């Protein structure tokens, strides 16, 4: 049954690399331990923030295993298992389940976006969800994929017993509201894919959020979840306002190189990205810092 | 001073045309009278829904005069006075003030959108607001203009003593939240430009809404305003959910021809649009009806 | 019959303004006289480069009259008569014909671009062409209007006896080629709307060009026309190569303020634009100059 | 030195799959043999048409080996070696060179397109070209990647001794002309990435084309190359006109499933695509057929 509760905040972990751009599993474990003190519902590995397109299949599996070992059992582990082809996605999902993932987060295939019709995507996700031993969460992230998972596809897929919900990173709150409205018979859980529209998503009925910003401001985001959950909308609003600029800075504006830089300021390991993602220039670092300091976070 | 309170709902009136596509001032007056029983904060004439680009300057002024005469003094009259050039916008704003408008709603000039930099737009609005005897509300409607009024321009313009607020029809709730946050020292009022993201906008701190849908579902939208204002977010959410599909149907999906068709179902005069806006086909009318009936409004 | 030959180059004239932003008809006449020495097929007034959205209807007509008086009878006068509504477009077309225009250039209405279906546009242009005493040329300029005139609409409209051709400023050469191919039974004339893709358009079978750059480099553009016409493709290519950067500089990059600045360098009257179009900054002027000097034009 | 001549037509091979979606190397070899009678300059494997994102690394290498064995030595073998990370791209390029590729075709990494600045891309390609034992051809395909390789990056990279040229599939002929103009000191070869703008590209100075349509209309495309090369522009134009609709049908309109269907009509093995690419519906097949038959190819 669809009983797994996704309500809460999940950081989509950055993947730590050594100076030679090798995955640094020790640093990864260290970050996971540090996140242990924050009341997250769980962690996400190998989402867009995890640089998953830059990891070999074997590396993706080892990241899952590593985090599973470091994570207390009461925390959920969502793992990004999406690949471009259906068969590769199924294979990766099976392997990640074996490696300890609780839920598979499956991004829309996108290279042939002109051919990714609603019907093609429904077929893709249905085959993956049918084959998967663990529940599936849909993942729509148009900033990276250049396409949205169409609403009608979401509504159809919400009826699948092994599809739990969606991470929607597009931020179109009208779409999010309608998605919740059209799936309310299905116990389908909608997760905001970014902290910029988190409060608005809660106001429309979302269950939680998978937010890059939670890598660095996890506690305030969990507080925002709680405030919305308990109906303290005025306080929630004030908190949300202060989170928008920091969020934009570590997503649209400066991306993962920005996020990893801020992680170092907050006591986590950040380190380099794999190329072609490039480190920030000093003026960019200054602007990044200003987005946090001017809102009282640094 | 900036003391005029825009808090509440405004319908952006459709402009009634006779079968020969002449402005039908009698029908317009009739509609205004019918809206008298709904607790709107005021009315908007000659927004995008008013087919303003299809009206001659003299017609635009007569619409303002006509509605001013029909409207009780305690209701605000906002009039769309934007033109492509700064000098034409100033002239139109002066004339509309004389014709009885309380506030000028000024859309971004857009034909040369590649040249409409933040600096050019700040200059444009500053000259208009300096010259205008009535307060100015900015108006950003990317679906029609193909451009956003940049956030940095909004923040700068919010400091102008004769600029009251903005109607934002883009629906990017992250932008709306940040706009409210960055202008909170300025007593700047943000109005949601569409019913699709009205609750979300209130949740972030908006003052009200100018919503096409208010031409036909004015009472429920005023109720949504009240529920949000009084903190009944759960009830508000249920109401908001039922408004999204009808709203999309009379805006993005079927536009003004759709809106005018629905007006007839709700007892208002709708009538034809000026060409090249074309009437709906019978299957489109069926789909339109479904958007209202499936949500309990018909 | 469709016997009017549009083969050749037309400059879409800039509209000169005085320092107070009034139309300067004397300067306009002066520029027309200077263009008399260049073998243009004719002139265009009140295209996008003519700042037509910034002119009042009466000003538009006076510009037509003024240029007609200054222009030898053997040169064609095309006048931009497009408005947003069908009825206003018809009225403007009739008046411009009376004022001496030989051909009406009719831009796609665009404010309600979501509703401008192929059927709506075919209806619009058919009504205009039916009513017009002078031939009509379609005008598609997506950089300004945010939309293309759909190919299927062009193919349908090409059959209208009073529609001569199209000015296509989009620059999609695949579309231009197909347009020529699908209308070759119709004696339909395709004009390149920009000098950037002029040679390519000739290679596919275009008749000529209406090019902003012809306001300043009219002679080389007429030479390019001749070279292509006579089959000197290698020389044509070398010339075309040197025209791309100057063309981009006075269109996409710096727009009409850039074009007017360059006009002064080449002995024409440029002068200010109407606001909100803003003058270039000194570094922009330097970059503009470089686009011409590095290609041997200054 | 940069002496390898890319002048001519290359089909970007489709990758044949069995009904169970396994790579069918026998069918691949069969197709290669059939292409032997057409005067192609060479073949491309694992471009976008080769469904490369759906193949495992090992499969990609085996496709290269298989085609190398089947291909006469005087035909060039270009192999798509692009991956998202720089290190994976280098590794794949080295392996493909070992497997027999003559040239590496390297698509822009694109998942983090917001971070793929000109500087980041120059760095990426420079590292790849430095490390590669075979020459590199840049590959920009915005329909799939959602981004263009910026012109300034192309101009910089054209100076690298191991970068031969670019396959440009965007079809912006102004950009293509400028690219050729700005790199003419560098002996940099520009290949049109689609048959829709092939003649136009030759007219501007391109060296050849890598065109999906060459999988089915290889002989006419080689004839078009020859006609342009020998200056028979009028005949070339007539041929080009008849190729646009078929080309659109097997690219933008129906993609690889369309291309594979047409391959069967022309005597090649087409077969299924890997999912989520879906087969055409019968009405789509009819439309596809019409694009070829109405232009005299069936």
Image (cartoon, coloured by chain):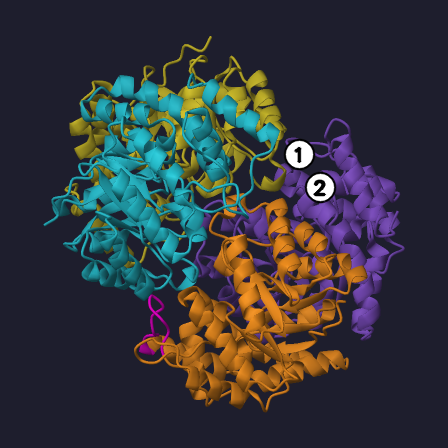
Chain colours: A cyan, B yellow, C purple, D orange
Q: What is the chain letter for disc 1?
A: C
Splitting the image into 4 quarters, where does residue C232 fall? bottom right
Q: Chain of mark 2?
A: C
Mark closest to the chain's N terminus, 1 or 2: 2
Q: Which residue is mark 1?
A: C277
The answer to whether B78 appears left or right of C159 in the picture is left
Q: Nearer the viewer, residue A63 or B15?
A: A63
Name the residue rendered at 32%, 23% in the picture: A220
**Crowding at label 2, few (<14), some or many (≥20) Cα neighbours within 10 Å?**
many
Q: Is residue B96 above or below residue C294?
A: above
- Classify mark 1: helix, strand or loop: loop
Task: Name the chief secondary structure element in magenta.
Answer: loop
Q: Is residue D176 above or below residue D199?
A: above
Name the side, left or right, on which A200 lies relative to D227.
left
- Residue located beneath label 2 in the image: C256
Asked if the residue at tag 2 contacts the one at tag 1, i.e. Cβ–Cβ closer than 8 Å, the answer is yes
Relative to the observer, which residue lies in front, B236 or D277? D277
Q: Quadrant of residue A205?
A: top left
């Amino acid at each position: 049954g669809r009983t797994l509760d996704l309500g809460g905040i999940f950081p989509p972990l950055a993947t730590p690399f050594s100076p030679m751009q090798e995955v640094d599993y020790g640093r990864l474990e260290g970050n996971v331990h540090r996140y242990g003190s924050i009341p997250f519902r769980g962690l996400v590995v190998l989402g867009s923030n995890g640089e998953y397109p830059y990891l070999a299949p074997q590396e993706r599996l080892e990241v899952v295993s590593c985090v599973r070992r470091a994570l207390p059992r009461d925390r959920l582990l969502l793992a990004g298992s999406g690949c471009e082809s259906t068969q590769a996605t199924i294979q990766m999902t099976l392997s990640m389940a074996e490696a300890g993932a609780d839920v598979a987060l499956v991004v829309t295939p996108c290279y042939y976006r002109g051919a990714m019709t609603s019907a093609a995507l429904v077929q893709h996700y249905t085959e993956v969800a049918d084959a998967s031993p663990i529940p599936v969460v849909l993942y729509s992230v148009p900033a990276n994929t250049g396409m949205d998972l169409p609403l009608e596809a979401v509504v159809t897929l919400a009826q699948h017993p092994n599809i739990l919900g969606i991470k929607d990173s597009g931020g179109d709150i009208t779409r999010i509201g309608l998605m919740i409205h059209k799936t309310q018979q299905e116990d389908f859980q909608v997760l905001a894919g970014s902290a910029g529209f988190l409060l608005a998503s809660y106001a429309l009925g979302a269950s939680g959020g998978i937010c890059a910003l939670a890598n660095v401001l996890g506690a305030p985001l969990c507080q925002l979840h709680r405030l919305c959950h308990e109906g303290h909308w005025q306080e929630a609003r004030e908190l949300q306002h202060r989170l928008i600029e920091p969020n934009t800075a570590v997503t649209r504006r400066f991306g993962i190189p920005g996020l990893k830089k801020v992680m170092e300021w907050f006591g986590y390991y950040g380190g380099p990205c794999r190329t072609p993602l490039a480190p920030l220039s000093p003026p960019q670092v200054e602007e990044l810092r200003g987005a946090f300091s001017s809102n009282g976070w640094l």
